[in-house]
Amino acid sequence: MSQQLSSELTPTCPSAQPEMSGASVFGIIQGSPSEPRVAYLERTVAMTPEVASLAGPVEPTEVFRIGAPCAGGGCVHFGEGRCRLAARLVQTLPVVSAAPPCAIRSTCVWWRQEGIAACMRCPQIVTRMYGATETLQEAATPKAGAAGIDNAKAGSTPTQ
């Protein structure tokens, strides 16, 4: 896919919730509860009720990495025209050994904004992570807006 074509596509949030419109699975969570790692799918799979039920008895966010169209200003992590979560993750998390192949990279908001630096941290990000490090919890916590106003809009947080 050419860079020109990919820039015309709707940006994808790589930290979406299963109930969001247009949600799809792009990774499966592996590893341990305290040190999860995402295994990336070759293609996305639409987040249907049937797919969500495969996560049972736990929540889909404990099993799947989910992408959906970016909510922009409707997300607690979005402000000043950018994803603040992506910026915080790049600033605070260590890198993994290699950027994984990813089915959503061409439209990923984190990739567009932070480049390969975001991809080098992405495998450690899980929406519902138990035993998250203090560093990851801090990175995932939405910050106050530029005017000091809390952005308390709907959105997702990698650690809850």
Image: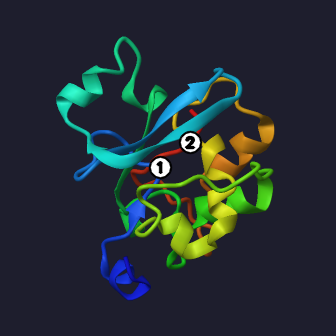
- Mark 1 surroundings: few (<14), some (14-19) or many (≥20) residues within 10 A: many
Tell me which amino acid carries mark 2.
Pro
Mark 2 and mark 1 residues within 8 Å of each other at the beta carbon: yes
* 122 vs 77, nearest the viewer: 122
Residue 15 numbered tag = 1
Residue for point 38% across, 28% down? 60
Residue 149 numbered tag = none
Residue 158 numbered tag = 2
* 11 vs 73, nearest the viewer: 11
- Can residue 127 be seen from the camera position used here? yes
Is 58 located above or below residue 143 in the figure? above
Residue furthest toward the left? Answer: 49
Residue 102, image x, y percentages = 49, 55
Residue for point 43% across, 58% down? 13
Which of the 4 quarters of the picture holds residue 35?
top right
* 69 vs 28, nearest the viewer: 28
Residue 145, image x, y percentages = 59, 68
Residue 11, image x, y percentages = 38, 69
